[in-house]
Image (spheres, grey):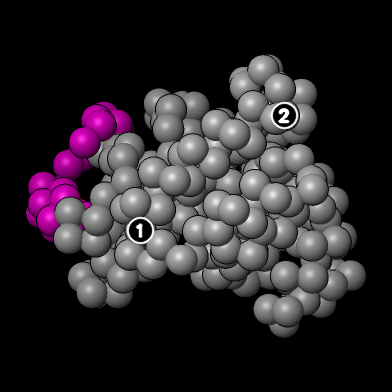
Amino acid sequence: MHTLEFFHDAVCGWCYLQSPRLREVVTSLDDNITVIHRSFVLQRNRQEMIARFGSMERAKSDILGHWQQCKLHAEQPERINIDGMRKASFEYPSGYAAALAAKAAEHLGGQKGHWDYFDRVQTAHLRDNLNIANHTVLECLAEDMGHNRLRFRELMRSEAVREAVDQDNARAKSIGVLTIPSILVNGTRLISQTLTSEQLTAVLTHLFTESPAGERHETV
């Protein structure tokens, strides 16, 4: 049994590239792998975004520059709609509400539920240019995926879900996660870069054969 802890944020373009690659690799290795999803919120609210970027306008400009780099490395660059987000009337969202929503989906559907919702909300953000800070948008996505909307809303607003997001961020801090996407392999080796499917297959195959013990948290 191997465990991968996948740290991500819904607004992260590099996570948008890594998630489907990780799905592909986990399926192809077929090696009794469990993927645990960890919410790593880059900025929780407007105030934190302004503190990080200087202004909301600068935040959107800088982040869309990151999107451009992601698009250059994407298997399907058309899935990243930079012009659409640039023209959007709303301020660039933080990923906190989406993290709460993904944890609500996890409560309802386990790790698979979290992953499926995370991928859907990232597509809504980067391709469809929806405002994923808006709870109505997040509830609609959940409903489209078959969840009961009222139950989903209750979970998003619950203390248990907020604590789960906080615990994921505390976990990230405790093992030294500074950037995303990051993947912690078997609790010991940390991959903190975006890898192609081929690179990820090679790294995981190597680390799985090492079977390291202890809590070393070395960065690959």
The residue pinned by badge 2 equals 56
Secondary structure under the numbered disc 1 in the rendered image: loop
Picture residue at 50% right of the left edge, 58% below the top: 80
- Which quarter of the figure is the C terminus placed in? top left
What percent of the width, then of the height, locates residue 202?
A: 13, 56
Which secondary structure, mark 2?
helix
The residues bearing labels 1 and 2 have C-alpha atoms spaced at a distance of 26 Å
Extreme residue in the bottom direction:
146
Residue 191 position within the rendered picture, expressed as x and y whole percent measured from the top left? 29, 41
Which quadrant would residue 45 be assigned to in this image?
Answer: top right
At horizontal 57% and vertical 63% (from top left) the residue drawn is 127
| Rendered location of residue 126, percent (x, y) | 57, 57
Q: Which amino acid, by three-letter code, is at mark 2?
A: Met
Q: Position of residue 154 (x, y in %)?
A: 87, 60
The residue at the point 49 percent across, 65 percent down is 79
Amino acid type indicated by mark 1: Ala
Say whether disc 1 or disc 2 marks the residue closer to the N-terminus: 2
83 up-or-down from 20: above or below: above
Label of residue 212 in the image: none
Based on the picture, tell me whether residue 65 belongs to the magenta stretch. no
Q: Residues within 10 Å of mark 1 (few under 14, many from 20)?
A: some
| Placement of 28 over or under 41, stated as above or below | below
Q: Inspect this view and state whether residue 208 appears.
A: no
- Asked if the residues shown at circle 1 and circle 2 are in contact, with their CB atoms under 8 angstroms apart, the answer is no
Seen in the picture, residue 41 relative to 112 is either above or below; the reply is above
Name the residue beneath numbered marker 1. Answer: 74
The N terminus: image quadrant: bottom left
Residue 212 shows in this picture: yes
Question: For this rendering, which residue is in front, 147 or 160?
Answer: 147
Magenta segment range? 200-220
